[in-house]
């Protein structure tokens, strides 16, 4: 409760006595609360103009204490489930990134505690941090493959995601992918349409195209459900879902012509391309200018050629 209250305090309200009190309690905080306090400090630094004239002052002292406590928490942790829960809150500060390596050491130290109940949370953490740790990936694959029948079908997406996103493959990962596909395929209709699109997209990134999944997504009934759902999604998620569907459509057409899935995004891609042409990036303009000077004229530079299936090829 105290840490959440700190997040709401304006920097002008933070007196020396309060700072001293915070320094006292941080040694009793778990990793999640330490991150919450770190978020509060980051807010105070943005709002407290005196910090520029007081660099060695109270915030620096508190941050030093905070980072020491976070490091000690990682080094002494002995319960994986508890740490995975605490790690869900991301402060986003530079110190957290510096502690990432120590976090991975901690996770590997407790690797024998990875089981079917926490494998989803661990996979999500690795994806969120974009951190490739082969020993942890192999352990995730081993546990999920062995206990796939105990894992809810909807968790298979999160479990597969780091392997696709981080481009990690092995014979064990191939086996994991196969058992996950067999596990969720009978329940395809239970997924939310946009989640199913994301699942198929990331499998395609891993060069995996389960036929039943692909045929479901590109069926008239499913696309109708997806259109209805898109109207209810936030704008950013709506746009991302549409883009992933386009990319999936392109990949299926190129990699699996035997599925006979038509390319039906020509008009949409053309509209997107026209919008992009009306807002050329300054960096791209500079590149075109330099190439023109090197090659002997702007007529030797061809901008953003559109290949079949709306691939954009610059220069």
Image (cartoon, rainbow, N blue to C red):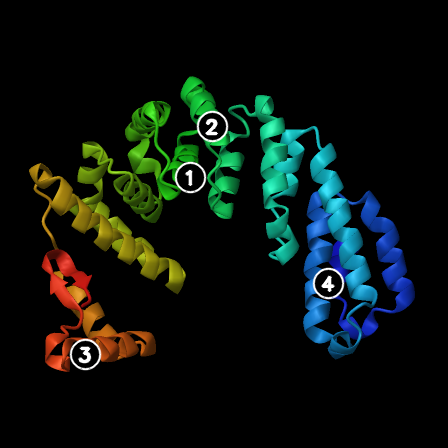
Q: Which mark is residue 14?
A: none
Q: Earlier in the sequence, mark 4 or mark 2?
A: 4
Residue 1, can we see it? no
Give SS at disc 3. Answer: helix
**Residue nearest the observer in this picture, 261 or 79:** 79
Instruction: Please provide percent x and percent y for residue 219.
Output: 17, 44
Return the residue at label 4: 41
Instruction: Please provide percent x and percent y for residue 73.
Output: 73, 39
Q: Which mark is residue 292?
A: 3
Q: Is residue 247 left or right of residue 66?
A: left
Numbered marks: total: 4
Image position of 105 with respect to 283: above or below:
above
Q: Is residue 15 left or right of residue 210?
A: right
> Which quarter of the figure has residue 200?
top left
Give SS at disc 1. Answer: helix
Q: Earlier in the sequence, mark 3 or mark 1?
A: 1
Return the residue at label 1: 162
Residue 99, can we see it? yes
CA gap, disc 4 and disc 2: 35 Å
Image position of 198 with respect to 236: above or below:
above
> Within 10 Å of the Cα at label 1, are there few (<14), some (14-19), or many (20+) other Cα atoms?
many
Residue positioned 28% across, 45% down in the render:
201
Quadrant where the C terminus sits is: bottom left
Q: Earlier in the sequence, mark 2 or mark 3?
A: 2
The reply to whether discs 2 and 1 touch (Cβ–Cβ < 8 Å) is: yes
The reply to whether discs 3 and 1 touch (Cβ–Cβ < 8 Å) is: no
> Which quarter of the figure has residue 180?
top left
CA gap, disc 3 and disc 1: 42 Å
Return the residue at label 2: 140
CA gap, disc 2 and disc 3: 51 Å
The reply to whether discs 4 and 2 touch (Cβ–Cβ < 8 Å) is: no
């Amino acid at each position: 409760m105290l840490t959440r209250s700190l997040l709401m305090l304006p920097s002008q309200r933070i007196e020396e006595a309060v700072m001293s009190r915070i320094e006292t309690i941080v040694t009793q905080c778990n990793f999640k609360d330490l991150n919450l306090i770190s978020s509060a400090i980051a807010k105070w630094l943005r709002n407290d103009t005196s910090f520029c004239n007081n660099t060695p002052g109270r915030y620096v002292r508190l941050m030093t204490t905070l980072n020491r406590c976070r490091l000690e928490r990682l080094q002494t942790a002995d319960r994986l489930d508890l740490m995975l829960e605490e790690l869900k809150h991301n402060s986003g500060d530079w110190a957290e990134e510096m502690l990432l390596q120590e976090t991975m050491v901690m996770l590997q130290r407790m690797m024998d505690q990875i089981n079917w109940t926490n494998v989803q949370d661990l996979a999500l953490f690795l994806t969120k941090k974009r951190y490739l740790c082969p020993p942890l990936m192999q352990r995730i694959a081993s546990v999920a493959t062995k206990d796939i029948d105990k894992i809810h079908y909807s968790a298979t997406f999160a479990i597969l995601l780091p392997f696709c996103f981080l481009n990690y493959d092995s014979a064990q990962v191939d086996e994991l992918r196969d058992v996950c596909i067999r596990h969720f395929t009978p329940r395809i209709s239970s997924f939310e349409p946009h989640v199913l699109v994301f699942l198929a997209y990331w499998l395609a990134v891993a060069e995996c195209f389960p036929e039943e999944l692909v045929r479901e997504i590109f069926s008239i009934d499913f696309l109708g459900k997806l259109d209805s759902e898109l109207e209810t999604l936030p704008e950013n998620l709506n746009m991302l879902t549409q883009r992933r569907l386009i990319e999936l459509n392109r990949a299926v057409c190129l990699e699996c012509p035997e599925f006979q899935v038509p390319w039906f995004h020509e008009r949409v891609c053309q509209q997107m391309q026209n919008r992009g042409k009306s807002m050329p990036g300054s960096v791209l303009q500079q590149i075109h200018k330099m190439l023109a000077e090197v090659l002997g004229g702007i007529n030797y530079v061809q901008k953003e050629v559109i290949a079949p299936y709306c691939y954009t090829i610059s220069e």
